[in-house]
Image (tube, helix red, strand yellow):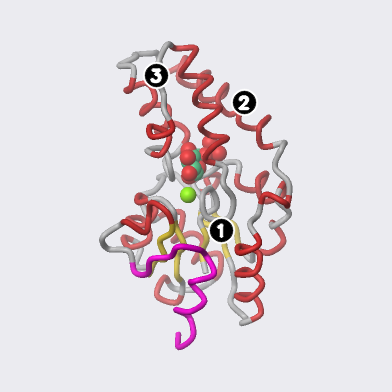
Amino acid sequence: MIFDLDGVLVHTDELHYQAWSAIAERLGIAFTRRDNDRLRGVSRADSLEIVLSLGMTEVSAVEKEVLADEKNAIYRQLLDRLTPRDVAPDVLATLDELQGRGLRLAIGSSSRNAKVILDRIGLRDRFDAISDGENITRSKPDPEVFLRAAQFLALTPGRCAVVEDARAGVDAALAGGFSCFGIGDAAEHPRVTWRLEKLSEMLEHLTDR
Ligand code: G6P
Ligand code: MG
């Protein structure tokens, strides 16, 4: 089972929102939570492009690097507040049950902060493999991050399933030949394999697989 991290196992969206808001405000760009929803599953560099496009703001490549670094510094400070209590009981119970059933678990996240987040919330040891922003060159909707996760698990995509909250993540999973559970925004994706209101509902779909 390959889990996206942000928005599936822990809600870091609000922290991304606060960090991007600080950058947008400095540039005089109006940035709402709705705008922030468009950044789900999107890499840091591509997220910056979206933020800049909201203000039709043009900056040099060097400035872009500085802005992305500044956003990340703010975000990293906010991540310091995360604790194991930020993981919902339903998420923990689901991971317990999956491991109890002998499934191997992996992370498939576009974030370059995935390992830091997993350490903060105390879940790093739960995963047999971590594929994240550090080992990919193309972010979702490209399937690279999930294909690498499957490779780390030594399984073909047909033997894995992905869990996603971002539409771009569902596209990535399907493009890679994975079936996909969609939660939140991703449950609205027309081609998602299974729709979930909460993570533990996935267990019902695994009985005969
Ligand atoms: C996840 C989040 C995105 C974020 C991306 C990169 O996919 O859903 O909102 O932009 O990771 O995050 P990073 O931690 O590398 O800046
Ligand atoms: Mg996500």
Q: CA distance from mark 1 to mark 2?
A: 24 Å
Q: Nearer the viewer, residue 14 or 209?
A: 14
Q: CA distance from mark 1 to mark 3?
A: 33 Å
Q: Residues within 10 Å of mark 1 (few under 14, many from 20)?
A: many
Q: Is residue 205 magenta?
A: yes
Q: Is label 3 in a helix, a strand or a loop?
A: loop
Which residue corresponds to the image point at 54% horizontal and 69% vertical from the top-left? Answer: 200
Q: Quadrant of residue 172?
A: bottom left
Q: Looking at the picture, which amino acid does disc 1 mark?
A: Ile
Residue that badge 2 annotates: 74
- Could you say where residue 56 lies in the image, as x and y percent from the top left? 30, 16
Which residue corresponds to the image point at 40% horizontal and 45% vertical from the top-left? Answer: 138
Which residue corresponds to the image point at 42% horizontal and 18% vertical from the top-left? Answer: 61
Residue that badge 1 annotates: 107
Q: Nearer the viewer, residue 73 or 148?
A: 73
Q: Looking at the picture, which amino acid does disc 2 mark?
A: Ile
- Residue 30's mark? 3
- Residue 158's mark? none
Q: Earlier in the sequence, mark 1 or mark 2?
A: 2
- Residue range highlighted in magenta: 193-209
Q: Is label 2 in a helix, a strand or a loop?
A: helix
Q: Residues within 10 Å of mark 2 (few under 14, many from 20)?
A: some
In this view, which residue lies farthest toward the bottom? 208
Q: CA distance from mark 2 to mark 3?
A: 18 Å
| Camera-nearest label, 2 or 3 | 3
Whether the residues at callouts 2 and 3 have beta carbons within 8 Å, the answer is: no
Q: Quadrant of residue 157?
A: bottom left
- Could you say where residue 173 lies in the image, as x and y percent from the top left? 38, 60
Q: Is residue 190 magenta?
A: no
- Could you say where residue 148 lies in the image, as x and y percent from the top left? 48, 59
